[in-house]
Image (cartoon, rainbow, N blue to C red):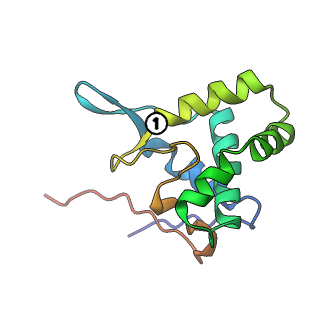
Amino acid sequence: MYKTINIKVDDESIHLYYLTVINSLIGSNSESGFKPDPLTTKELELYSEILKINQKFISLSPEARAEYIHSNTVRKSIRTKLDTSVANYNNVLSRLSSKITLTGQKLYNLGAVPKDFENIHNYEGIQYRLFREKV
């Protein structure tokens, strides 16, 4: 038997909800391998904005999108929307750059985002299954 939890999202909130759901699968590298290191609220908000912009310009090449996202104009726009200082923005961005997904993909690299995160906007839904193996 499975329990289904439905969450209605719109174009504005889908990235934030997606990141919130997968947050436990985000971490960092350590000597012993993957170390869980979930995103903070500020990291969730900032990365959600980056993913929205990435989706909006999905028709550009990944390199062009990364360059655009990392541009001063876009950075200022995000800082204004999140009401944060340059120093705080750069600090959060630096922390994002050190995070990886459970599959080992770097979460953020100078504007580039993992391929798995590119088409979230187009999904009809996202299904996660946690299961126990029967012994």
Q: Nearer the viewer, residue 72 or 85?
A: 72
Residue 70, quarter of the rendered image: top right
x and y percent of residue 52 in the render? 69, 58
x and y percent of residue 76 in the render? 81, 39
x and y percent of residue 16 in the render? 66, 52
Q: In which quarter of the image is the N terminus?
A: bottom left
Residue 56, quarter of the rendered image: bottom right
Q: Quadrant of the C terminus?
A: bottom left
What is the tally of numbered marks visible in this picture?
A: 1
Above or below for 57 versus 99: below
Residue at the far top in the pictured view? 87
Is 2 left or right of 64, judged from the image as shown? left
Give the residue pinned by disc 1.
Answer: 99
Is 94 left or right of 37, judged from the image as shown? right
Q: Nearer the viewer, residue 120 or 106?
A: 106
Task: Identify the residue at horizontal 58%, vertical 66% (top origin).
Answer: 120
Above or below for 121 versus 131: below
Above or below for 67 versus 134: above
Task: Identify the residue at horizontal 63%, vertical 24% (top origin).
Answer: 91
x and y percent of residue 118 in the render? 55, 64
Q: Is residue 20 among the parts visible in the rendering?
A: yes
Task: Identify the residue at horizontal 27%, vertical 56% (top origin).
Answer: 132
Secondary structure, mark 1, is loop
Is 61 left or right of 82, judged from the image as shown? left
Q: Is residue 38 among the parts visible in the rendering?
A: no
Instruction: Determine crowd level at label 1: few under 14, some 14-19, many 20+ residues with C-alpha closer than 10 A.
Output: many
Q: Which amino acid does label 1 sit on?
A: Lys
